[in-house]
Image (spheres, helix red, strand yellow):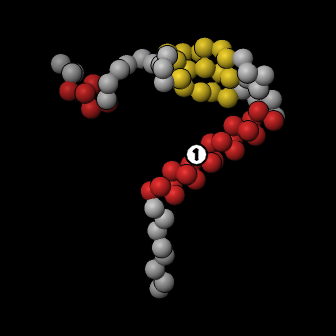
């Protein structure tokens, strides 16, 4: 059996970012809304191809998941 070479973490990140960029461009070309998360406002938006943004939700909790588990009574 032949051993396969593994790609680095940096290459995985670059490929994932490229896939997201391509999918966003594709949805923009097809005039479909894209769901995005704004880290500054911590809100979820539907972003249309013409650039308009409609707020559809907000972040429910702050902190890490493991911190929420510890707080259970």
* Above or below 34: residue 2: below
Residue at the image point whose x is 25% and y is 27% from the top: 67
The residue indicated by pointer 1 is 17
How many marks the image carries: the answer is 1
In which quarter of the view is residue 64 placed?
top left
Q: Is residue 45 above or below residue 31?
A: above
Q: Nearer the viewer, residue 57 or 72?
A: 57
Report helix, strand or loop for mark 1: helix
How many other residues sit within 10 Å of disc 1, few (<14), some (14-19) or many (≥20)? few
Q: Position of residue 33 (x, y in %)?
A: 72, 26
- Of all residues, the one furthest to the left in this rendering is 73
Q: Residue furthest right?
A: 30
**In the image, residue 44 lies at what x, y percent?**
55, 20
Asked if residue 20 is positioned above or below residue 67 in the image, the reply reads below
| Picture residue at 76% right of the left edge, 33% below the top | 28
In the picture, measured across the screen, residue 72 lies left or right of residue 47, that is left
Q: Residue 70: which quarter of the image?
A: top left
Residue 55: image location, x then y, percent: 60, 14
Q: Position of residue 34 (x, y in %)?
A: 67, 29
Q: Residue drawn at (73%, 38%), measured in percent from left and top? A: 25
Quadrant where the C terminus lies? top left
Question: Does residue 52 appear to the left or right of 16 in the view shown?
Answer: right
């Amino acid at each position: 059996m032949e051993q396969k070479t593994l790609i680095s973490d940096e290459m995985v990140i670059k490929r994932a970012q490229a896939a997201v960029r391509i999918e966003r461009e594709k949805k923009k070309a097809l005039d479909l809304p894209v769901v995005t998360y704004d880290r500054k406002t911590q809100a979820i938006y539907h972003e249309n191809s013409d650039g308009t943004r409609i707020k559809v939700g907000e972040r429910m909790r702050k902190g890490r998941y493991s911190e929420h588990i510890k707080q259970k009574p």
